[in-house]
Every structure is written in C-alpha cells, then in structure tokens.
Image (tube, rainbow, N blue to C red):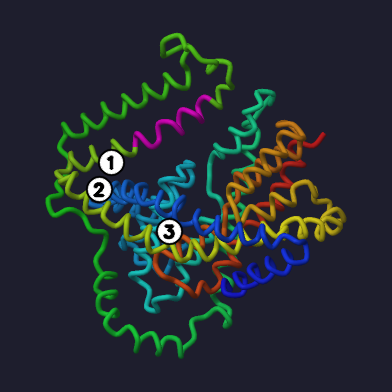
Amino acid sequence: MLNYIWLGLMLAAVLIGGWNGKLKDVSDAALTMANTAVVTIAFALIGIMALWLGVMRLAERAGLVAMLARALRPIMRAIFPEVPAEHSAMGSMLMNIAANMLGLGNAATPLGLRAMKDLETLNPHPGTATNAMCTFLAINTSGMQIIPVTAIAILAAPKLSANPTAIVGTSIICTACAAVAGVTMAKILSRLPMFRVKAEGRIQNAQLNQDQVAPVAAEAKPPIKEAATLQPMPAWGYAVFAVFGLCFGYFFLRLAFPSMFGPPPITDEPEKNVFIRVVSAVSLLSIPFLLSAIPLFAMLRRVKVYEEFVDGAKEGFDVAIRIIPYLVAMLVAVGMFRGAGGIDILSAALSPMMNALGFPTELLPMVLVRPLSGSGSLGFFTELVGKYGPDSLIARTAGTIYGSTETTFYVLAVYFGSVAVKRTRHAVIAGLTADLVSVIMAVIVCRMMFEG
C-alpha cells in the first residue's frame, strides 16, 4: 500500500508542479524535507530515544511493566490475541498508550518504537507487518489523548476565549470513536485474502531467514525480563515512595491552586480557568515524576539503576539511525506534494462535494494536511483560530480534529522503519479509517454541542 501512495505523491508532485510552474518549489521542498528528516527529526530523536529507552529499561527490570501488563491483561489479550500475555511487548505497548493519553509525545514515540521492537521478536516473517503491529499502529494513529494540550494552548493563546477547554469532552469522544474504528478495521482487513501473508512469502522468508528463526523464537518465549537482583520492596521502601508521592501531590496543588497552597503568584496564572491550571500542572509534572519515580522504585527493589539505564539508553542511537531512510522517503514525498500545490488542488476539488454533505470547507486544508504533517496542520489550525475566533464553531471543531487525530504517515514511517518493515499490509487503511472517523465525529459532535 505504501508503495503506491509514495509513488503517487512523487508523480503527482512533479506533474502538478510542472503544470503550476512550481517545479523550483518542488525541488526546494525535496531538499529541505530530506534535511529535516535527518537533522531536525532523526538526530534530535537520538537523545530523546536514549533517555526514554533507559527509563523503560528501569521500569522493565523493576517489574513495573509486568505489573502494568498483568493489571490490564484481559483488555490487551482481547485486542492483541497474537501476543503472549507475559511477553514484554504487552508492557511496552501499554506504556506507549499511557504516554499518548497523557499527551507526552516525547515519551510516547520512544516507547512506541520499543513496543515495535518487542513485537518484531514475535514476527515469523521479517519485513512484513504482523496483525498485532497493524492494530497497534491503528491505536497510535487515532490520537489517543485524554487532554489535547496543544489544541487547548492555541485556543487559549489569544486570551479572548471564554472556555478554551470546551474541546476536551469532544476530543475524548472523537478519539475513542477513532480508536474503536481503527482497531475494528484492522481486525476486519486482517481476515481478507488480499492482506494475508502469502504462502510463497512464508517459504521464501523461511529460506532467507533460517539464521533468524531460532533467535526470534528464543527471544519470544521468556516473559518480561526482570533484574536478577530484584527483591520485594521492604516496608520502609513503601514509606519512602509514599513520601515522594506526597511531595509531588503538594507540587501539583501549588501549581493548580496557587492562591491556596503557594506563595502569591507573580504571573497571571490565577486569572486562568481552574481546569486550565490543572491541565497545565499535570503536563508540567508528568515528565519529572516519571523520570524520578521509576528510578526510585527500581532502586528500592535493589535494581542497579545507573547500569541498567545506560544499557537501555544504548538502543536509542541504533533506532534513530535505522529510521532515517524511511523518514527521508516519506517526508520528501509529502513535502514535494505540498510544495507543488497539491493540497490546494485537492481542497478546491473536494469543496463542492463537502458543501453538499454539510462539511465545513474551511476545515478541508487542515484535514488533508493532518495525516501528512503535524507542523502544517498546526499552522492551519492557528490560522483558523485567528480568523474565526477561539470560541467559534470552526475553531472548536478544528481543535477537536487536531486533538483526536495523528500524523498517520509520519507515525507509519517511523514505527515501521524502526523494525525495517516494508510490507505494511492493511496498516495504512486502518490508520486513515481512524482519522476519517475522528473528523466525521468531530463535525457531528461539535455541531451538537457548540452550534447556536
């Protein structure tokens, strides 16, 4: 599927650019996006990957991942029946989903890549996406967020919005519908003959990867690895961890309710809506809490935290370098298509049909760009807020769409690229289905809640 999409974007970009006299823009976009893929994204990802894979290693060795996997085993087994209940992939996927729900994008991506690596250990056909991978990607492309922090920040920026957090409820509804639709579509498509792994492909893979079969099988068998020195936490350890948690509870109260629990603020923080202060406090404290609580928990269970962190962080460089070819290929194609004016042509062509269906045509450019570019869709969203006002139906619908969708093609390129998967099977269709359902639900729900 990606073969046809990529080739279609490249050919359309050149043909449209030639017709519009924008071939120079197409060429410039290709070079710029190639540089962006390597310098801005892949190299910048090395440090982030090293940090969060190190933390993930500590969580795994301290038994936190196993605890999380056991707690949610019935749900995860229903969604991913192909993955053994005690396999490390279960915990990795749960950590990624939790980070996405909290809006921790910098943490979610490394944890998602770790989950893909764990899922690859169960893959009998290297280079081809498994059903579990496609389902996992469908969940990721549904924009699983409880609170769309970025969208709320854009709506609140003009300081003219009466209620910038009004989109929280609509975003939760839309992202839930998108996740259900994406997973359902992935399950349905996996049963179709056209998306099944062909028998000849199995034979060929078995012949070409004989040396890999034994290691993969051996790696897939053991449950989540815990440290050899792991011991039950003593009573005083629970006390220490509880005191640490209370400290963060106090920090939260100071940030969320500064007039009651903190010194007189010197900023305009008290003027903000209480919900906004709570959201800001959660966003501000989440990463410091994870970066300190997980190592502390591991240390209290006798894990050698520094050594284990370093061992986990070593994987970050390899993963970041491995995804470069996939990033370059996808981002160059997307950049060329946008530079040629392809998005404008699509918007103009679809506007009459969208008008007939009652879809706000003002949202079309953002909706078309969203699966392709995060920065591009954010720019369109900001422009809509400035033009129509933060409390307008258009702005709130755009915020709901932005908060409940994801840059699908970027996610597919990075996640599959990290495990060298080239045959993505039905992952693209499942991901785009999640996006489409989210957009449709956003228009319906926002009209029900905000119109008139």
Q: Count how many numbered circles sit on residues in the image.
A: 3
Mark 1 crowd level (few <14, some 14–19, many ≥20, 10 Å Cα): many
Q: What's the residue type where badge 1 is placed?
A: Ile
Q: In the image, residue 410 lies at what x, y percent?
A: 53, 58
Q: Residue at x 80, y 49 (%)?
A: 361
Q: Which segment did they paint magenta?
A: 277-289
Q: Is residue 185 above or below residue 49?
A: below
Say the numbered circle drawn on residue 92.
none
Q: What's the residue type where badge 3 is placed?
A: Met
Q: Is residue 425 left or right of residue 338?
A: left
- Label 2 sits on residue: 58
Q: Quadrant of the C terminus?
A: top right
User: Mark 1 and 2 residues: CB-CB less than 8 Å, in contact?
Assistant: yes
CA gap, disc 3 and disc 1: 23 Å
Q: What's the residue type where badge 2 is placed?
A: Leu
- Label 3 sits on residue: 76
Q: Residue at x 44, y 21 (%)?
A: 255
Q: Earlier in the sequence, mark 3 or mark 1?
A: 3
Residue 297 counted in the magenta span: no
Q: In the image, residue 296 lies at what x, y percent?
A: 23, 37
Depth order, front residue of 219/384:
384
Residue 189 falls in image quadrant: bottom right
Q: Is residue 227 left or right of residue 11?
A: left
Q: Which of pointers 3 and 2 indicates the residue nearer the eye?
A: 2
Q: Is residue 128 above or below residue 158?
A: below
Dot 1: what SS? helix
- Label 1 sits on residue: 294
Q: Earlier in the sequence, mark 1 or mark 2?
A: 2
Depth order, front residue of 389/67:
389
Helix, strand or loop for the magenta stretch, by majority: helix
